[in-house]
Image (tube, coloured by chain):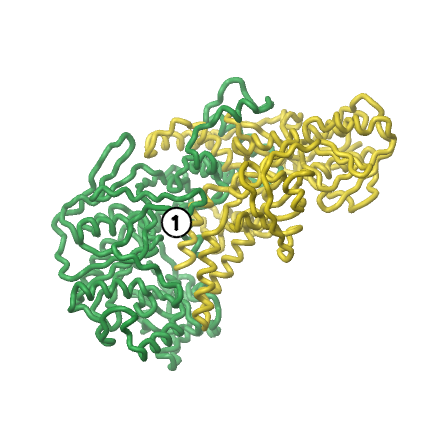
Chain colours: A green, B yellow
Amino acid sequence: MNPVLKTLLVLAASGVLFLGGFSFKDLRAGRLPGSSAFAQAVPVTNKAAVKKTPTQIFSEEFTRISNQYAGDSDPKSLATAGFQGMMNALGDPHSIFMEPVFAREFEDSTQGRQFFGGIGARLSPDLLGVKVIQVFKGSPAIQAGIRTGDVIIGVNGEDVQGKDVDEIVGKIKGEIGTSVKLLVLRNGKDKVNFELKRDKIIPPSADANVIENTNVGYVLVTGFEAPTPRQFAEAIQELEDKKIEGLVIDLRNNPGGLLESAARMLSLFIDYKPVVTVISRGDVKEVVNSTGGIAKTFKYPVTILLNEQSASAAEIFAGVLRDYKLATLVGEHTYGKASVQNVIPLVDGSSVKITVAHYKLPNGDDISRKQDEDGVYLSGGIKPDVEVPLQLNSDVSYGDPKTDNQLKKAIEIIQQKNPKAKLLSLGIQGGAQRIPYEIQGEYRQAEDQARPENHHWVG
Amino acid sequence: MIGSGWAGLVYRDRVEMGPAPAAMPVTQNESPLLAQLGGKASIDERQKFFQLLDLVDRYYVEEVSDKEKLAVGAVRGMVTGLWDSRAQFLDKDQYTAYKGALGGELQGVGAEVRYRYDEVELNKFRELRKKMEAAKSSAEMEIPEDYDPSRLVPDLVVTYVAPNSPAAREGLKAGDVIDKIDGKRVISSRFRKELDEMFSQIRRGDVDPEKLAKLRKEYRDNIENSLIPARALDKLTVEKGAALKVTWLQGGNVKVPMTKTIGRSSVKASGHLPVGGNEVVQFWDGADALLAKAITGKSKVTLDLRGVSNGTLSNLRACLGVLLPSGTYGAVKNPKTGVLQPFKIDGKPGDKPSNIELITDATTQGNAAIFGQALLASGKARIIEGPPLPKDQPVVELIELQDGSAYLLPIGFFSSEVTK
C-alpha cells in the first residue's frame, strides 16, 4: 500500500478525508457560530422559524441529498461521509469515525493481527532489485536460507532490476500456500535460486540485532501494538545474551499505539512508578503506573532515536525514560500528540475513535503540538537531549550506521558513556571527522550499493 | 520512510481540515424545483447519528456545548463526500461572501474561483469504491492496494473575473487554474502526482548522491510550502488584506504559467454590462431590471455569453422573463429518480425582442449555457459566433442551513428537448 496512504489510513481512516469537514475558520478561531452572517442571510425556504435539533438537521439533509441529488450516491456512503464530517467538526484530528472496513483494519493493526501472505523478510530498495534487510524468525525465508544482505534480482523468472520497490514487493507477496521463485544475488556475485512457499506473515513490531561490527544492540520498534511488549522483552533478552555494551531503541517513524503497551514496556525500566497522568473531562486525573516486579537494571547506556513521526505511545515511552534519566534521546523533535483516544465499536462494524483525555509526563510536561494554520509545526513534542537532524546529503538506510547519521550519533553517545562499547572492527570512536580517508572511501562505496531509504514489510 | 511518512503526517493534519468550497454563486433555492421534497429519513441513519452525538456527549475530552456544529459538520461531510465539483458546502464566511457576490460585490481579488475534480482520478476512485462495496459483508470487504482518497484534491479554477477588479487588471481570466499563492503551491491532484513521482524517484535512487539529496530537499520543501485548496480559496475570494503574489496556469495549461501581484479590494460589478453594442448578463440580483432597461425598444438583441458568472437559477429565470413570453422552455431531469420537471418561465411585461443573437465560447457553461438553450428553444435565438452550447448542464440548488452556512446541490440536468 502507498506509504502516504498507510499513514493516512492508520491515523485518520477512510473516505472523506480531504473535504470531510473541518471548517477552517471555526477551527482557527475556535469560535461558535456568529450572529452577523446569520442576520444578513436572505430568507429562504429551508429556514424554519423554530430551531431544529442537530438530529433533525442531519436527518432532513440526509433525506434531501439521498432523494434529490442528481448524481451517483448510495445512502450508506452518504451516511458514512456524514458521520465522518460530524466527527471532524470537533476540530480534533484524532477523533474520527471509521466505516467497518477501516475499523477492522485499525483494530487488526493495534492488535498486531495484520498479516499477509509472503516470505517473511524486510526489504529495501536497491539498484539491482530489492535488498533483504532482515529475515523474520520462523519465516519461509529463513527456512529456505535467505540471508540479510541478499539482493533479490528476479521474481518468478522475471528480472526486477530498476522496478519500483512497491511493485517488486507486490510480486513477492501473494496468497498463503502458493509458491514464489526468487533469484538472489549473494555477496555481490553468486546467483542463487530459491523456491519458497508463502506463509502467513505478521511482521514483528519490535526486534533486535547487534549492529554490525559493534557490541551495541539495536531494537527497532515500529509500533506499540498488543504483542509488542512481549516482542520487546524478548528482543532485549536476546541482545543481553549477546553481551551488548549499549542499546539503541529506534522509535523513529513510530506512530504509537496502545498506552498499555507503552506502560508494560516501561515496566522493564521502572518499577511501579508513574508513567503518565491522564486528565479527562472536568480535570479528573488518573495516574498510570508501570507494573512492579519486572524491572531490570540496565548496566549499559540506552539511547532512543526520535523524529517528527514519533508520536503518541512512542513519545510517552521516550519521555518517561528521559524524565527518569534512564535514556538519552537523540534525533529530532517528536510529533506532539498529547491525547488519549478510545475506540468504541458500533453494532454494524464501524467504530468511533474519540479523544477522551490528555496526558502529562512524569515531570509535568505537556507536549501538545502547536502548528500554524497550514499545519506546519511550530512547537510541542519532545525535544531530544541531543539534536541531530537526519542528514539528507547522504543516502540513508535506517539502521545502518554507515549511512544513518542519527544512529551513528546514538552509538557515539553510548561510546562516550561506556568505553567498553566500540565500533569493533573499524576500531574508531567518534564522528565522521575521525574516519580515516580510506575508510571514507569504503563508506561511499557502501552508500552506492545501499540505495534504500524505505523499508518495506514483505512477505 | 524519510519523506513519505513524514509527508503523510503533515499532509494529514492539513488536509483533514478540508478545503471548504468556493464562494461561487450558482443558484438559490427559491426555486419551485426543490419544494416537492419527499421521502423519509432512514430510521437507521437517524439513530446512528443520535448515537454518535451521545458518544461525543459522554466521552469527548471537552464538553461540546454547540451540537449544531456537529450536525452542520455532518452535512458538510455528506456534501463533500459526493465528490462532485457542483456540490459545495459554504461555511458562514463563504456564504456571506457568496451572497455579496450575488449583489455584484466581490471580495478578495474580484474573481469567482471554484473547485474542479480531476475526472480521471474521480472515476478511478468511484470504481474502487464500487469494488469495495461489492463485498457481501463488511467482514469480506478489503481495502484495495491503490485506494487513495487523498488523490482526490480538486483544482482551483477561475470561473469569472469581474471587470475593473484587481484580478482583471492583472489579466486573470475564466478557465485559468491557480497554482501558487505567495510562493506556496496549492495542493491539487497534479501537485500530488508530482510529489508521488518525486518520491518514487527518490526511492529508486540515483548514482549521483548530490542529485538525490537535491531531490529530497525539493520534495520536503514542496510539502512544507504548500496550501490546502480551502486556504487558497479563502485568500482569493473571502479575505481582505495585502496583495497576493499569484501564479496561475493560463487556460489550465501547465506550459503557460503567469505570475502577477494582485491586490485585494471589494469590487462592485454590475449585473449587466453593454460591451461594444452586445449585452452581457450576469445572473445576479437585479440583473433582470438592468437588462429590461438596456433592451427597451430594441427588436434585435445580441447577448455575449462568454465568461459569464454563474449567478443564480432564479435570476436566470427572471432574465429569461425579460426576453421571452410566458411558456415552457425545456425541462430539468433527474437521471436517478427519473423525474422530469418542466422549465417554466413567467414572461415580464414589456416588449420582447424578436431576434436574439448569441455569442459563445468554451467558457459558456453552467447557467450561461442553460440560459442560451432556453433562448434557442424559444425559436427566437441563434448563435452567431462561437461553438454550440454544451448539453445536459447541471441545475444546482442552494440550501441554507440554520447556522448561516449553506450548500449547493445538483438536482438534475437541463434539457431543452422536452419543451413541447
- List x then y, in percent, for residue A116: 38, 58
Image point 43% across, 32% down: which residue? B48
- Residue A199 visible within the image: yes
Image height check: is B367 above or below A290?
Answer: above
Q: Is residue B321 above or below residue B194?
A: above
For residue A118, above or below residue B329 = below
How many numbered circles does the render carry? 1
Going by the picture, which residue comes out furthest to the top? A49
Q: Which residue is mark 1?
A: A10
Query: Is residue B248 or residue A282 the one in the foreground?
Result: B248
| Foreground pick, B372 / A294 | B372
Residue under the point 63% across and 31% down: B105
Which of the two residues, B174 or A254, is positioned nearer the viewer here?
Answer: B174
Residue A105 at x, y = what percent?
A: 39, 49
Amino acid of disc 1: Val
Subunit that carries the residue with mark 1: A
Residue A205 visible to the viewer: no
Looking at the rendered image, the quarter that the C terminus of chain A falls into is: bottom left
Q: Is residue A164 left or right of residue A245?
A: right
B48 with respect to B334 (left or right)? left
Q: Nearer the viewer, residue B274 or B228?
A: B274
Which element type, helix, strand or loop, lies under badge 1?
helix
Could you say where residue B358 lies in the image, as x and y percent from the top left? 80, 39
Q: Quadrant of residue A275?
A: top left
